Amino acid sequence: MPVKGRGSARVLSLSGEWMDCTVTASRKWLTIDQEELVANGMSGSPILSPEGRAIGLMSTGEQNPILRANLPAWFFHR
């Protein structure tokens, strides 16, 4: 089960720069608190912990049906 809470992270911008941000983890989602850092076209960009570990993947729209169709069943929790 994912850890709930708030913490620091880094996200890759469209220009290829790493930007510091704050993320909030809920039961199902990891969200970037600074909406101004999120832009269309960033989908697929990694979200990293301060230690450099991948903790999420950027999605700038609704759940991508192509991505969803190709992820393993265990990825989705009911």
Image (spheres, rainbow, N blue to C red):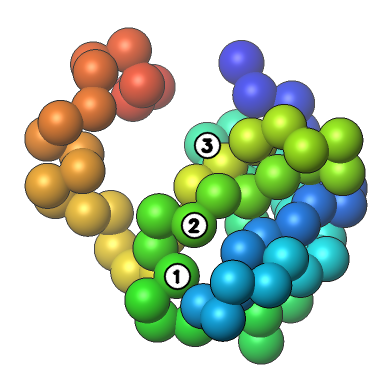
Q: Amino acid at mark 3?
A: Lys
Amino acid at circle 2: Ser
Residue 49, how many percent across, how many down?
Answer: 79, 41
Quick one: label 2 or label 3, which is nearer the N terminus?
3
Residue drawn at the location 20% of the way across and 39% of the way down: 68
Instruction: Give the structural element (helix, strand or loop) at label 2.
Output: loop
Q: Quadrant of residue 60?
A: bottom left
| Residue 13 image point, x, y percent | 60, 74
Element marked by disc 1: loop
Label 3 and label 1: CA atoms lie apart by 20 Å
Quarter of the image with the C terminus is: top left
Residue 14 position (above or below residue 8): below
Label 3 belongs to which residue? Answer: 28
Q: Quadrant of the N terminus?
A: top right
The residue carrying pointer 2 sits among few (fewer than 14), some (14 to 19) or many (20 or more) residues within 10 Å by Cα, namely some
Residue at label 1?
Answer: 42
Question: What residue is rendered at 87% in x and 44% in y?
Answer: 50
Name the residue carrying label 2: 45
